[in-house]
Amino acid sequence: MADAPKLFKVTIDNITIEVEAGTSILQAARKIGGDVAPPAMCYYTRLKGSGGKCRTCLVEVAAGSTADPRPMPKLVASCRTNVMDGMIVKNITSEKVIDARNGVVEFLLINHPLDCPICDQAGECDLQNLSYEHGKEGTRYEFPRRTFEKHDLGPYIQLHMTRCIMCFRCVYTADQLTEKRVHGILDRGDHAEIATYIQKSLDHDFIGNVIDVCPVGALTDKTFRFKNRVWFLKPLDAHRQCSNPKCSGKVTLWNRGEEVFRVTARKDQWGEVEDWICNECRFEKKKTSDWTIEGPTMINRHSVIAQGHYVGVQKPQEVLYDVLDGRKPRLFMDIHSVSQVNEPGRDLSKIEGPAHSTDFIENNK
Amino acid sequence: MQALTNKAKVVERKPMTVWERLYLPAIAQGMSITFGHIFKKRPTINYPEKQRPFSPVFRGLHVLNRDEEGRERCTACGLCAVACPAEAITMEAAERLPGEEKLYREEKYAAKYEINMLRCIFCGLCEEACPKDAIYLSETFAPSNYTRKGFIYGKDELLIPDPKTQPEEYAKARGNK
């Protein structure tokens, strides 16, 4: 009597699906996909033990199971609640859930500085998407917001504690990918912050992944800092043979022309990393020639990153010389003779860390 | 063929009458119209000595704004550039160094900011997109120029004068907005 895995029938927003026992409601909803899947800020499939902190994935359980069809008294966090046979879950069909999610977004934004115009994460930020889709326009919070000084965590990672929403993802990443975690949460309650003991720097081959798992702009890539906005870059799938056996070498390159501005791990449709990559791939291989390019990354067309319309673009042929029988036009303006932006001699992607006023003065003619 | 509108007029090709062929009465009639215009209100003005008031919704030359303390408002967020249908705006961002707090409002600023006035269509979408109230379209024209090179406007052309050191120029550049 071979044990076929027992399948549970669960109904989410009137859509019934069969999933294995032990699946969380969030995972079952993601199998259905689309709007039914609750948003998640702290849960991360590839990080064991994550979830249950941010409360954005709250759903209403209208019937617990076939055996016990009573509804659950309160909204439950779908990332930490497993399905039961005959469970009926309401996500977007429940007004209670939508109202609760509005409240959660308001709470998450209480101390968030909303400095999206400055933040490098803007355009690919989970909190930005969440507040855009589920949040209210205004806030009722009238008190001064919690602020921190920005920290350098080693040469590559910048920590902006003000933007942090305490999802613990980076802590789990450091725990599970590196042997020794040197950063964590200090203090409790309102004072809690991500920090290292006495400004230690994070250096481990895989610590760069905390940048990718961070749902907000609290942990950002210092080699990319302020260099460009994500929606002006062209994401390309690429890979290389990495010497590190644990590193997959499969990445997304963020190019502008031939310049590689940033390297990140590939993300799936839920914004979660598919394969971890090492620091060498992420921070040191900033040349197109280092990589085998597979093709443009698929970007959701509702994303601002798709604004660039890079896929399938064909550069129009230069017809001027044909029209002029091979003569050169007498008045031809080379834009670089006037423009000071994108000067041929100055590659922002090659500067270590963010550009400063000093970087521009020495290049000025 | 049926005409689309009834505005078409058939040209008369009748031979002229004696009165018309006399020539002088027609001259007198024409001159009377000309002299009559001397006493009418003139529709033109002597630009640039005199200038007409702009409509409050007029969209003219761009200005990069400063705040009350004279710090640049622009943080190089790139929203104007992504909103620009003509792709006229380009910029390069830089991080504010310690000691530059009086120059720039936020920790990031536009080290280079350029508008290609040859491409710009003065639609005002950059002004609408700006989250920092940093760029707006003023009530002036882009002045004419002999070369195309003169139409690439950098920060030195676009930035409004400092309200602390040059309050008069600032007020003039700011206009009624």
Image: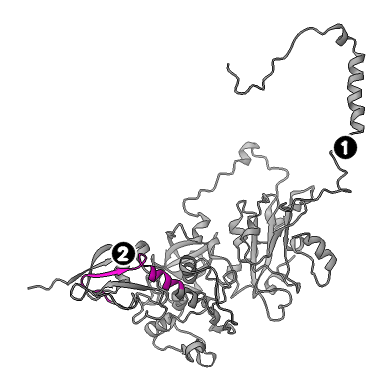
Residue under the point 20% across and 76% down: A68
In the figure, A187 relative to A214: above or below? below
- For badge 2, the amino acid type reads Asp
Quadrant location of residue B98?
A: bottom right
Residue under the point 50% across and 87% down: A190
The local crowd at label 2, few if under 14, some if 14 to 19, many if 20 or more residues have their Cα within 10 Å, is some
Judge whether residue B25 can be spotted in this image: yes
Label 2 sits on residue: A13
Residue B114, image x and y in percent?
A: 69, 59
- For badge 1, the amino acid type reads Lys
Please give the range of residues in magenta: A82-102
- Residue situated in front as seen by the camera: A238 or A66: A66
Q: Residue furthest left?
A: A1
Quadrant location of residue A339?
A: bottom right
Cα gap from disc 2 to disc 1, whole angstroms: 73 Å
Label 1 resides on the chain identified as B
Residue A50, image x and y in percent?
A: 37, 80
The local secondary structure at tag 1 comes to loop
Label 1 sits on residue: B41
- Residue situated in front as seen by the camera: B43 or A74: A74
- Left or right: residue B107 versus residue A127 is right
The quarter of the rendered structure image containing the C terminus of chain A is: bottom right
